[in-house]
């Protein structure tokens, strides 16, 4: 069992790191089994939030409009994490979003991690649900669900509860986190001009900030508009 690590959690616009984006990052630094520092930032995803995400997280569109882009926040997060092992509940999910963001900013982000979800599946197979909310209820861990920093704290507490109850040293060994990703190219000037012309001609509003789209996102949105409304 390790007692020095950084627990990380993200809230996102959806579940697919190729299509969705981070809206909140939370992390806590743990030293000798105790939380010593905390990192918490809202992120502007450059798109409108689905109502289900607003309801789930309590994060509003108004809050995100004035939040920084991921490019502004990511270097500070990586500095906060340093060389630490990452810990989280379904940590590969959070790592995949962060790794994609890092690759897009030409930043290195290779990590080892510990997944409390995998630990729970190994040691508590009788529990019907292994969600973080269910496990926290099982262990009496109080927290604000679906907010990044709170989830990171909850995963930390869950980790120490599990390690105390099930002291199997091999189970807590960090493993390399693997998520292969290619850099997303930003939208081109030509694509941007075309999208502005299409939305103006057809008098439509899209749920994205055009200048923050990637090249592939711009192509998909353009194709959808043309299919529904026609060309310029």
Image (cartoon, rainbow, N blue to C red):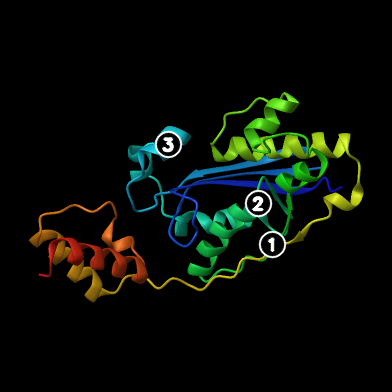
Q: Quadrant of the C terminus?
A: bottom left
Q: Are marks 2 and 1 in contact (CB under 8 Å)?
A: yes
Left or right of 20: which side holds 113? right
Q: CA distance from mark 2 to mark 1?
A: 8 Å
Left or right of 69: which side holds 165? right
Pick whichever of labels 3 and 1 is earlier in the sequence: 3
User: Which element type, helix, strand or loop, lies under badge 2?
Assistant: helix
**Residue in the picture at 46% in, 49% down:** 14
**Residue in the picture at 64% in, 40% down:** 152
Where is mark 3, residue-wise?
59
Where is mark 2, residue-wise?
91
Pick whichever of labels 2 and 1 is earlier in the sequence: 2
Q: Residue 135 at x, y = what percent?
A: 70, 32
Q: CA distance from mark 3 to mark 1?
A: 28 Å
Where is mark 1, residue-wise?
177
Mark 3 closeness class: few <14, some 14–19, many ≥20 residues within 10 Å: some
């Amino acid at each position: 069992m390790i007692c020095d690590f950084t627990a990380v959690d993200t809230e996102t616009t959806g579940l697919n790191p190729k299509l969705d984006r981070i809206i909140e990052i939370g992390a806590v630094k743990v030293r000798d089994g105790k939380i010593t520092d905390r990192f918490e930032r809202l992120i502007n995803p450059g798109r409108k939030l689905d109502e289900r995400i607003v309801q789930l997280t309590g994060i509003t569109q108004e809050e995100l409009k004035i939040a920084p882009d991921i490019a502004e926040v990511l270097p500070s997060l990586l500095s906060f994490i340093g060389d630490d092992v990452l810990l989280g509940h379904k940590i590969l999910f959070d790592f995949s979003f962060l790794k994609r963001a890092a690759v897009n900013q030409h930043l290195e982000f290779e990590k080892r991690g510990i997944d409390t979800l995998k630990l729970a599946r190994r040691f508590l197979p009788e529990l019907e649900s292994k969600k973080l909310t269910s496990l926290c209820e099982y262990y009496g861990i109080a927290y604000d669900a679906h907010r990044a920093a709170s989830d990171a704290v909850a995963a930390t507490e869950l980790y120490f509860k599990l390690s105390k109850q099930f002291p199997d040293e091999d189970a807590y060994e960090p493993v390399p986190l693997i998520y292969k990703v290619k850099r997303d190219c930003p939208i081109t000037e030509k694509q941007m001009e075309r999208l502005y012309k299409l939305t103006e001609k057809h008098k439509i509003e899209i749920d994205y900030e055009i200048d923050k789209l990637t090249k592939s996102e711009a192509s998909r949105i353009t194709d959808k508009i043309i299919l529904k409304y026609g060309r310029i």
